Image (spheres, rainbow, N blue to C red):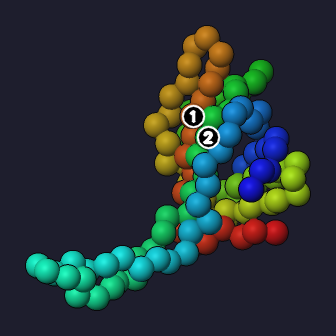
């Protein structure tokens, strides 16, 4: 599904989105339990709800403050009208930034399934 340009917010603070995002709304999935010669059954496992991508550092951007974000509401809004909302999300990325273009790869993970508004 094409979603177009995205806007990223963490607790109401907007960040400059760059490129595309990878998201998981979470939930549960079935995984096979493998025996020696066949599938013996299935188990249910939790799918990690997350959003990851890249932002561009702007004037006043503080990398230490950004990577310290926790218990935040992360909202991704697309110009295609989709709105994804992760509650109580924590920064779980590497905390790096490129010097030339100020690119900051990020990942936020939530304990709860994301809402699709």
Please say if the residues under marks 2 and 1 sit with CB atoms less than 8 Å apart.
yes
Number of other residues with Cα within 10 Å of mark 1, as a class: few under 14, some 14 to 19, many 20 or more: some
> Residue at label 1?
105
Residue 103 position within the rendered picture, expressed as x and y whole percent measured from the top left: 62, 25
Of the pair 110 and 72, the residue shown nearer to us: 110
Q: Is residue 18 left or right of residue 67?
A: right
In this view of the protein, can residue 65 be seen by the observer?
no
- Mark 1 falls on what kind of element? strand
Q: Is residue 48 left or right of residue 9?
A: left
| The N terminus: image quadrant | bottom right
State the residue at coordinates (77%, 33%). 16
Of the pair 105 and 32, the residue shown nearer to us: 32
- Specify which label sits upstream in the sequence, 2 or 1: 2
Number of other residues with Cα within 10 Å of mark 2, as a class: few under 14, some 14 to 19, many 20 or more: some
> Residue at label 2?
53
Q: Is residue 89 left or right of residue 5?
A: left
Establish if 80 lies above or below 5: below
Establish if 22 lies above or below 71: above
- Label 2 – label 1 distance at C-alpha: 6 Å
Residue 70 position within the rendered picture, expressed as x and y whole percent measured from the top left: 58, 54
Of the pair 67 and 102, the residue shown nearer to us: 102
């Amino acid at each position: 599904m094409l979603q177009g340009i995205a806007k990223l917010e963490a607790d109401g603070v907007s960040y400059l989105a760059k490129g595309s995002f990878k998201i998981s709304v979470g939930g549960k999935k079935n995984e096979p339990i493998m025996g020696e010669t066949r599938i013996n059954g299935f188990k249910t496992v939790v799918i990690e709800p997350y959003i990851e991508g890249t932002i561009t550092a702007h004037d006043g951007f503080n990398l230490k403050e950004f990577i310290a974000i926790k218990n935040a509401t992360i909202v991704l809004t697309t110009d295609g009208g989709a709105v994804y909302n992760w509650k109580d999300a924590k920064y779980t990325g590497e905390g790096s930034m490129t010097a030339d273009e100020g690119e900051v790869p990020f990942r936020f993970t939530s304990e709860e399934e994301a809402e699709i508004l």
